[in-house]
Every structure is written in C-alpha cells, then in structure tokens.
Image (cartoon, rainbow, N blue to C red):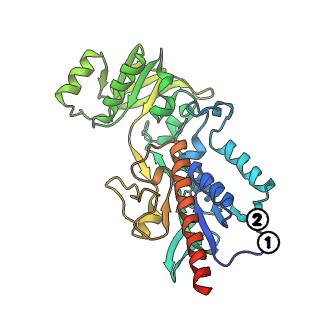
Amino acid sequence: MTTTERKLPEVYDIAVIGAGAAGMMAALRGVLNNDTVLLFGGTSKDKKKSRAQWVGKVDNIPGFSIYKKGILDPNKETLNFIKESEFSENLFHHPSTGVEDIIKEDGHFTIKASKEESFKAKYVILATGVMDVQPKIEGTINTIFPYANVQSVDYCIRCDGHHVKNKETAIIGNDGESAAWIAVLLHERYNPPHITVITDGHEPNYSDDLKKLLELYKIQVITKGLDGIRGDEKTGKLEGFYFCDGTFQPVDFAFISLGMLVYNELASKMKAATDERGFVTTSEKGESSIDGLYVAGDLRANTKKQIYTAWDTAVDAADDINTRLRREKRQALLSQN
Ligand SMILES: Cc1cc2nc3c(=O)[nH]c(=O)nc-3n(C[C@H](O)[C@H](O)[C@H](O)COP(=O)(O)OP(=O)(O)OC[C@H]3O[C@@H](n4cnc5c(N)ncnc54)[C@H](O)[C@@H]3O)c2cc1C
C-alpha cells in the first residue's frame, strides 16, 4: 500500500479526504470500482479531533460489538483486505497526511497537503466529519474525558441511548430545548429511574407543553452550573456531578447535548454551499455546489450522523464519480471513432 516503487498517476481519479467511516468506505468503493484513489488520513491533530478516533464499542450495527474501536479496527481490516487483493494497485494511501487546501483549476482539483506535497485529482470526496462540543467543567473540557465513551458519558442517542436502562441519567445541555427533548425521549423509551437535565447555568426558556411533560415525567432541571465530577477516572465509572452551589447529583450515565463543531473549512474555502449549521449541502448523490466536489459522512447536510449513513453516502459519491469517469472515457472513445 505504500506509494513507493509504483508509477504514480499524474492525475488521480478520486481524492478522498478523511479516513474515518465515510472516507474508508469511499476509498474501498472507489478501489473496487477500479478507479485510482488517493486517501488522506489526516495529521495526528486531525485524527485526535475526529469522531473515528473516539468511537469505542458499537452496539447498533450487526456484528460490530466484537470491535474495541468500532471504526478504527474494521478500517484496519479493510486496508489489509485491499492490500492483499488484486485491486491493491488502485490505492494510494497517505495515512498521516492532512489536506490544507483544495483548488479547482484547469478541470481538475489540486490538493495541497501537509508536508508541502501537492496532488491532482479529477474528483474529490470530502469526509472530514464533525466533533461533538464538550462541556467545560472546572474550566476545561479535559475533566469529562476519563468518563467519555466508556459507557458512562456519551453523545449519540441512536448509538448509546439504550445504556440508560435502569440507570440514574443526566443530559448536559445549554439553555435551549434539545437536552430536555432528549430527556423526554429517553424517559418514554427506557423509563430510567431518574433523569436530570443539567443546563449551562442559564435558565432555559421551554415551551408550555415541554414544561408540562417534564413535570409529568418527573424530569428535574438543574440550572446551577456544573462545577465538578465524582467518579473513578481510571475505570471511567461515573458517580455524579457537583454544582456551583456545592450540591451533588448522583448520576450513572450522562449524555452531552451541546451541539457539533462542523469541519467544513476546506469546503468553505472553496465556497461550497452550507446550511445554517455549517453542514455542506449536496445533491442526492452527494455532490456539493462545486462541480466534482462530493461530500460524505457527518459533514454532509441532512443525514443521520451514523457509521452506516457515512458508508451509504460514501458509496453514492464513489459510484456517481465512477459513472462520470466511465461516461468521459466512453464519449472520448466514440468521438475518436
Ligand atoms: C462517542 C461516539 C460514539 C459513536 N458511536 C456510534 C455507534 O455506536 N454507531 C454509529 O453508527 N455511529 C456512532 N457514532 C457516530 C460516528 O462516529 C460518525 O457518524 C462517523 O464517525 C462519521 O464518519 P465520518 O467519516 O464522517 O467522520 P469521522 O469518522 O470523524 O472521520 C473524519 C476523518 O477525517 C480526517 N480529517 C479531518 N480533517 C482532515 C484534513 N484536513 N485532512 C485529512 N483528513 C482529515 C480525520 O483524521 C478522520 O480520519 C459515534 C460518535 C461518537 C462521537
């Protein structure tokens, strides 16, 4: 899989930027479609701030609970499969390279990567993902990390909501309604013994119906502001949260609902259209407002932010690109004959 000892294409068919759930699937589909694929995994800084790095055990995909790292482990297997396959020559993998800029010129994309390297590709699939906003406790986001993704603190209801069954539960949110609606959903679906909504210290402005539901479901709202965590940092076992007035709330399992940081810098530099939250808007096949620039995975607007949707959007993008590549070759052949 190294790029040494191989004649490098002057212009690659597809450049896939990001090697998380979407990027790996885009690369696999592209390689199996017999297209040449450049795959960038990102610098260590890019990796650290990607969801791929943080996903542990995955319960909501059949067969996946065997992996300790539900994205990184199967991705490694996939790279090995490609390496051993008769399609290995199609993949040009740069595992630790980040992309800093993309310029569209003369009908192709020039990709400016870290290490001052530059590559050309006919099409680009951008799969740089998003990251969940972390709560600041004791002045830093680091306080939550020993408990995150070890079945104590999680971010995704569809992935981990089922863990609240029989647990003292909390939702950490801000002064909007989202955290309270998550609490309502978890109560209706799993009826845990107790649910608390913890705001960022501000009084929330809930609708009358939501207020009534919280009261009926006995969901407590604490607005005193988080001041600390009690638990075992080594095992990640959570015991509860301290508040600014010195009080303590026992909690076994907490969800964070503070929004997402959308990694749309490359798309924005190219002036690709985004929605009001910063997700890149695309056609049904995943093409952005820039001709030939596709988006897959969490970065794409109007998708479930899940591994299997990342895969689906990646397949749509790689297949659409293959259709266009074949059409270009077919038309060139027909015009010559
Ligand atoms: C704690 C947690 C648990 C989750 N559990 C589940 C689950 O159980 N089931 C489920 O279906 N979903 C789960 N998800 C959601 C899932 O992780 C995402 O939907 C999925 O990772 C999205 O894939 P992606 O490829 O879009 O982004 P990511 O997987 O985040 O990958 C982004 C990639 O882009 C790279 N990158 C970023 N910037 C650059 C750059 N400039 N140049 C090159 N590369 C770059 C990064 O290094 C990384 O490789 C979970 C999410 C979290 C946070």
Label 2 environment density (alpha carbons within 10 Å; few <14, some 14–19, many ≥20): some
Q: Locate the N terminus by quadrant.
A: bottom right
Amino acid at the residue labelled 2: Glu
Of discs 2 and 1, which sits in the foreground?
2
Task: Compare marks 2 and 1 and give the one earlier in the sequence.
Answer: 1
Query: Label 2: which residue?
Result: 89
Q: Residue at x 47, y 44 (%)?
A: 305
Residues marked 2 and 1 touching at CB (< 8 Å): yes
Give residue 10's quadrant in the image.
bottom right
Residue 308 image point, x, y percent: 54, 42
Q: Residue at x 66, y 55 (%)?
A: 28
Query: Label 1: which residue?
Result: 6
- In the picture, measured across the screen, residue 66 lies left or right of residue 177, that is right
Amino acid at the residue labelled 1: Arg
Residue 258 vs 116, above or below: the answer is above
Q: Nearer the viewer, residue 280 or 313?
A: 313
Please tell me whether mark 1 sits on a helix, a strand or a loop: loop
Residue 96 visible in the current orientation? no
Q: Residue furthest bottom?
A: 336
- In the picture, measured across the screen, residue 337 lies left or right of residue 320, that is right
- In the picture, measured across the screen, residue 52 lies left or right of residue 286, that is right
Residue 232 visible in the current orientation? yes
Residue 38 image point, x, y percent: 65, 65
* Residue at mark 2 to residue at mark 1: CA–CA distance: 8 Å
Please tell me whether mark 2 sits on a helix, a strand or a loop: helix
Q: Locate the C terminus by quadrant.
A: bottom right
